[in-house]
Amino acid sequence: MTREEVFEKLNEVFRDVFDDEDIKVAESTNADDIEDWDSLSHINLVVAVEKEFGIKFSMGETQKMKNVGEMVDIILERTK
């Protein structure tokens, strides 16, 4: 899977979780960039991403991720 393919899938997940068809995530997208991204929606987002890609993030990984680019790095590493 390419980085671009991961971003395409993540865009769909983000749009679904935040119920906003205009969301387009980028490498630097973080919680400050999406109005409704709070702690509860973060949990929903992590679960939705795990389900979409068939992976599980560790607690440390979820706390360490500072932006969508770092999430993509982990997804690509896990789906090799």
Image: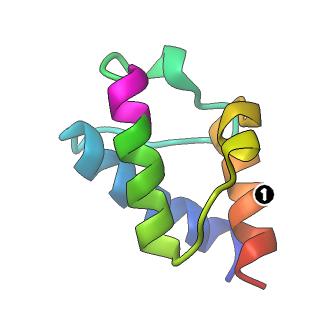
Where residue 23 appears, x then y in whole percent? 35, 39
Vertical side of 18 occupied by 7: above or below: below
* Residue drawn at point x = 34 percent, y = 32 percent: 41
Where residue 22 appears, x then y in whole percent? 28, 39
**Main secondary structure found in the magenta portion:** helix
* Residue drawn at point x = 74 percent, y = 45 percent: 61
What are the residue bounds of the magenta stretch?
38-42
Q: Can the viewer see residue 69 in this picture?
A: no
- Position of 78 compared to 21: left or right? right
- Position of 69 compared to 4: left or right? right
Q: Residues within 10 Å of mark 1 (few under 14, many from 20)?
A: some
Q: Which residue is mark 1?
A: 73
Where residue 29 appears, x then y in whole percent? 59, 31
* Residue drawn at point x = 64 percent, y = 57 percent: 57
Q: Amino acid at mark 1?
A: Asp
For the N terminus, give its image quadrant.
Answer: bottom right
Dot 1 lies on which element?
A: helix
